[in-house]
Amino acid sequence: MRATDPEILNAIKKVLQEDTVIHSQNELFEKVTKKLSETDEVRVSAERIRRVAKKYGVRVQVHSRKGREIKTCPFCGKELQDILSQDLFGRSTTIGKLCKNCKFEIGLGRSPARYIFRR
């Protein structure tokens, strides 16, 4: 059975009441699926849990690393826009990426490495 957003959100809230900080997406995935599967077998992906958490106001801190530049937002799936700045000579320079929908921001040439979830 596929879990609904309210079911996922309730499980996330229960997990965050027990632990105020979850240090990785994988750890949150394991704890949430355990909570959801207490009554019956429920299917949900780690990506969906991350997206539901961000959508409904769970504080998510993103640690990034140098790597392949991402094109879409990891939370809402919308296309990221360039953050522009001017150099000393007045030329526009791209310094990062921004999601206009959910305000996710990341530096240029970086990709998400770890998600930390807080109550």
Image (cartoon, rainbow, N blue to C red):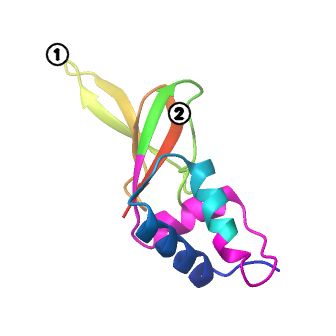
98 over 63 or under it: above or below:
below
- Please tell me in which quadrant of the rendered image residue 105 appears: top left
Q: Residues within 10 Å of mark 1 (few under 14, many from 20)?
A: few
Q: In which quarter of the image is the C terminus?
A: bottom left
Is label 2 in a helix, a strand or a loop? strand
Q: Outermost residue, top direction?
A: 89
- Which disc, if any, is residue 88? 1
Residue toward you, 17 or 47? 17
Q: Residues within 10 Å of mark 2 (few under 14, many from 20)?
A: some
87 over 97 or under it: above or below:
above
Q: Which residue type does callout 2 highlight?
A: Ser
Is label 1 in a helix, a strand or a loop? loop
Mark 2 in CB contact with mark 1 (< 8 angstroms): no
Task: State which region is magenta.
Answer: 35-61
- Give the residue at mark 2: 111
- Residue at horizontal 60 percent and vertical 75 percent from the top: 8
- Residue at horizontal 56 percent and vertical 24 percent from the top: 67
Query: Residue 78, percent across and down?
Result: 55, 57
- Residue at horizontal 26 percent and vertical 30 percent from the top: 85
Q: Distance between the residues labelled 2 and 1?
A: 27 Å
Q: Which residue type does callout 1 highlight?
A: Leu
Query: Residue 5, percent across and down?
Result: 60, 79
Residue toward you, 111 or 77? 111
Residue toward you, 16 or 106? 16
